[in-house]
Image (cartoon, rainbow, N blue to C red):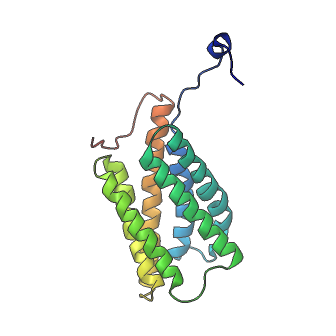
Amino acid sequence: MLRNEAEQDLTPTVAAVNPAPLGLCGFALTTFVLSAANAGLFTGDSIVIGLALFYGGLAQLLAGMWEFKVGNTFGATAFTSYGAFWLAVGGSLQFHWIAPGQGFGFFLLGWTIFTLMLFLCTLRLSVGLMALFGLLFVTFALLTVHALGGPPVTAVLGGYLGILTALVAWYNALAGLLVATKAGYTLPTGPRS
């Protein structure tokens, strides 16, 4: 139904907000917990299932859709994809879909390649995002080597690098939140464009 001109003038306008801090926080916390398990800091990766399904998965997926809305193709692709990654990991852990053998290694190899693609895109964005995607690439590479039959130390190293990756993601999220809340100070992220 078409509205008349007077009704259109009464339609409230909503300012676009930055969904990136939400997506980064969902990614960071979920990555932190699973990486701590990979590093051997605790046993039992099932603790990550709820985070993977809801915060790393659903919240990131939503952040990705909102990035489409504000016209950020990179953010939309990254958050939607990693949200789907966490949903797949959460579902795989919950329903025991990870078959023994090298299948999971090829799953991780695909994510390693995808992360390298995104890292290359960050070279013109910011140092903060370069650090995040560079660390994530190396983390995925180590976990891939382990899953394809490499030595156990590669999983532990991947776990510790994953923890560092999570800390860098939280830093980038905080930088975005400080700008959004007009906190009066900012964190440097090293814009490159």
Instruction: Give the position of the C terminus as an image quadrant.
Output: top left
Q: Which residue occupies 65% across, 74% down?
A: 93
Q: Is residue 65 visible?
A: yes
Q: Is residue 19 visible?
A: no
In the image, residue 5 sits, relative to residue 17, either above or below, namely above
Q: Which residue occupies 46% across, 48% down?
A: 75
Instruction: Give the position of the N terminus as an image quadrant.
Output: top right
In the image, residue 165 sits, relative to residue 68, either above or below, namely below
Residue at the farthest front position: 1
Residue 69: give x, y in percent of width and height.
53, 39
Q: Is 111 placed left or right of 56 in the picture?
A: left
Residue 63: give x, y in percent of width and height.
56, 47
Residue in the foreground of this view, choosing between 61 and 182: 61
Q: How many marks?
A: 0
Residue 36: give x, y in percent of width and height.
53, 69
Residue in the foreground of this view, choosing between 5 and 92: 5
Q: Which residue occupies 64% across, 68% down?
A: 90
Q: Which residue occupies 64% across, 76% down?
A: 44
Which quadrant holds residue 47? bottom right
Which quadrant holds residue 83? bottom right
In the image, residue 178 sits, relative to residue 156, either above or below, namely above
Residue 125: give x, y in percent of width and height.
32, 46
